[in-house]
Each structure stands twice: as C-alpha cells, then as structure tokens.
Amino acid sequence: MFADSSELGNFTIGSGSSSPTEQVNSPGSCGNQPQAIQQCAICGDRATGKHYGASSCDGCKGFFRRSVRKNHYYQCRFGRGCIVDKDKRNQCRYCRLRKCFKAGMKKEAVQNERDRISLRPPSVDESVGNGLSVASLLSAERHRVGASGEVNCAENEISNRKVADITDVCESMKQQLMTLVHWAKVIPAFTELTLDDQMALLKAHSGKHLLLGLARRSLHLKDILLLGNNCIIARHPPCQLDPEMKHLDLSQVGCRVMDELVKPLSEVNIDESEFACLKAMVFLDPNTKGLSEPSKIKAMRYQVQMNLEDYISDRQYDPRGRFGEILLTLPALQSISWKMIEQIQVAKLFSDIHIDQLLQEMLLGGAAGESTLNEPAVAMGLGHNFSVDHSVHSYGHALSSPGTDVEDPGSPPRSLVQCSDVEQPQSNGDVLFLSSPPHSHTGGHFQVLMSTFKRELQPSSPY
C-alpha cells in the first residue's frame, strides 16, 4: 500500500471510473486536429503509442501498469486538483492515476496482458530469476561489506589516514579479492553454476570488482580514494613517497577512478541497490572465456538488467536516462582495470616489489616469481602500433571482457576502447605489458594457487 499523504481524497484502483461530466484537460486530447507529434494524454510528454486504451508516454504507461498490478492506494492532500504535466507528474500519484483513467486507460487491459504472459511457457530468462532479485543482490553486498569490516568515515577523519604505499595497496587488493568470494557465495543463482564457471567469472572480473569497491567506498569523499584497509590514495600525494612507488603511478590510476567512476556515480547519486545490480551485471559476463554454460549466464545478466530497470522505474523521481547514465561508467571501468594491471606489471618488472600469489593469478595471469614474458601477456616496444579489440556497440558489449589482441607492428590498429582510454605511448625504450586473457594458463599452478578459492566456494557441510 502506497500513500502520498493522509489528507483529503484517496484513490484505489477499483474507483477508477470517471463520471460523464469530467473532462480530460490534457495537452494531447483537445480537439480533433491531427498532430505531427502525438502527446501523452496524461502528462503532455511525447507519446510512444496507445497503451491500455490511451495515448501515453512510457513513463505514464509504466506508472499505470505498476499501480494496477500492485493495487496501490493513493491519497491527495491538495483537493484532487494537482497539475499533472511533464515536470510535475511525479508529485501526486492520486491525481496522476485519476488522469490515467480519465484519459481512457483500462485496468482490464493490464490484467489481460498479465494473463497472456502467464500462459506462456517460462523462457530461459524467466527460469533463472530466482536469487537475482534486487533484494538478494543487496543482501549479498551487505554481507560482503560486513565480512570485510568496512565502515563509512567522515572526510575530516579520512584526511589523517595513512597514505598507501605499495604494500598497503597489495594487501588491500588481496583482502578485497577474498571478500569477493564471500559476496558471490551468498548469491543463490551463482551457487547453481558449475565450480569451473564460478572460478572463471571470479578471475575474469577481479580487477573491475576491485575498482568498483574502491569507487563505492569513496563516493562521499573529495580527491581521496579509501582502500579496504583504511589507507588512502590522494589526488595530490605528498612529495615524500616510497622509492619503490615511482614505478607504480597510483595517482594516474587514482585520478581516473575519481574522475571517471566516483564523479559520475556520485552525480547520479547511485544507491546501494543500484550499485549491487551494477556489480552483478559486470560479474555475469557470458563472454568470459572457458564458460560451459554461457547462455545461462547471459540469461542471468538479462534478469538483473530487467530488475534494475524496474527498480529505477519505481523510484519517486523521474527515472528517464538514469539507467543509461549508470551503464555509461562500464567502458571506463574496463579501461581503468587494464591500466591498473599494466601499472602493476610495470612495477613488478622494474622493482623488487613482491606480488602475492593470489594477486599474481587473479590479476596478472601467472605464478609468482614466473616471468610475465613467458606468459601469454605480450611485451611490446612502445614505438609499435597496437590495439585492444574491444568495440563497444552497446552497454551489453561494455559488460564483456574479451582478451587483448596484438597486431603486427606494421598493420594499422583495428579498434580502440576510446581515444582517451588507450594513451599513445612515448618511444622511450620502455616495455608495455597487456594483461593475458583469463583462460591463458599452462601447467597446474593455476589449480594449486586457486585452491583457497575453491574451498571457499564449496558448499558448507551441515555436520
């Protein structure tokens, strides 16, 4: 039951019939003159067609459908005379619903539509919906936060925290990778996948999940990123830094996280539920290499997408464009993830930094102490042309995680993530490394080093 206020008139779905003397005073229903652009008979926005018996926009169509299906109860505190237009249609649900009925919308049309849908055999998409609801994903995210011991701190408290060095960064990454397993385990749909598919998904998107967690913890901060171990990365770090840090340019990656992830997510004021859905959509990538059931994972991601769209539509404010704004962060997330991995590889090559075995496997694709030159990650002279074969045609493609392809030095690049994402390197004789695909492994060290993850993923014994 949903009420706008406790005063004056109230409105239920059963009282939707209008009297013969009532007139629909809407921009799209006056006169019989033909219009080049049809307007919504309820709010005056651009109509997308005739829905449930009246010309309406998608917003009013969805509002009417949800009101009927959920049998909402609305009240008006302004004498049932509220203005319902494009800008104020969300202010009073009572008057908006009454205007829907006045315009000719029929609740029977919604119920008949639901009856027709219920007669269809369940599709693959619908059959995987259990365990992927917004509530389930939010519960999983809260479980992860609780397991990691994260707390929200005020900005004045953050400024006194330790500035992270390379050891702090690696320890935070290792800690967050372990909590990623705990997060996945409490998603019912994930536990239904084969163990090999679970492992493939965890490994393929570990870098992006590290960045998403970093961005989420830093949404309320300015020019500071908060690591999982409560150390910080500042936009303008102190001059005195660990000498080993000169090869790991944290400020470059950190500034991109602040500008391309934290800033846009803060501007849309993303909430916990939306973030949980975004994280699941990144995770459930059917293009991940080595999957035995990619179609099932694709259906799972589609279900999360639909749940997120419905959640946004049910919000009180105007949801137009919000879904797209959230998804527009995904190309940047992929690009920054590649940059972060590149920086770690360069730091490992040019310094004595110790990379934990778990980080080596999850992020760099090789055993600790094993030269990345022998791995499928490719070392290239910076003067050569190269490209990442990853064209983003839609938000669906932005969720994918293809491997990186290296072209012949004399051939032109095929496609770039974005002009700003892949910077043209300088010919200074250094070496650039691109991360290897998640399935590129030889020998048995991968199974050995990931045994910890497998033990965590196995269901607990009831005894």
Image (tube, rainbow, N blue to C red):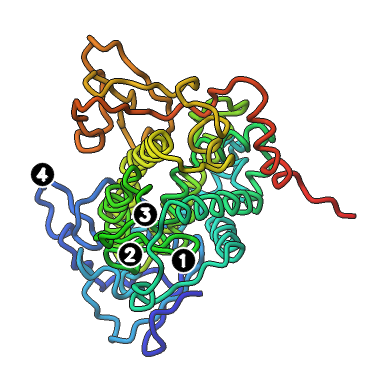
Q: Is residue 181 above or below residue 8?
A: above
Left or right, residue 108 beside residue 94:
right
Q: Is tag 2's residue or tag 4's residue first in the polypeptide sequence?
A: 4
Q: Is tag 3's residue or tag 1's residue first in the polypeptide sequence?
A: 1
Q: CA distance from mark 3 to mark 1?
A: 18 Å
Mark 3: which amino acid? Asp
In front: label 3 or label 1: 3
Q: Nearer the viewer, residue 330 or 380?
A: 380
Q: CA distance from mark 2 to mark 4?
A: 37 Å
Q: Secondary structure at mark 2?
A: loop
In front: label 2 or label 1: 1
Give the residue at mark 2: 269
User: How would you rate the neighbour count of disc 1 (Cα within 10 Å): few for under 14, some for 14-19, many for 20 or more?
Assistant: some
Mark 1: which amino acid? Asn
Give the residue at mark 3: 242
Give the residue at mark 4: 36
Q: Is residue 285 above or below residue 381?
A: below
Q: Secondary structure at mark 3?
A: loop
Q: Nearer the viewer, residue 132 or 422?
A: 422
User: How would you rate the neighbour count of disc 3 (Cα within 10 Å): few for under 14, some for 14-19, many for 20 or more?
Assistant: few
Asked whether residue 109 appears in the rendered view, the answer is: no
Give the residue at mark 1: 230
Mark 4: which amino acid? Ala
Q: Is tag 3's residue or tag 2's residue first in the polypeptide sequence?
A: 3
- Where does the image place residue 162, in percent across and percent down from the top left? 40, 67
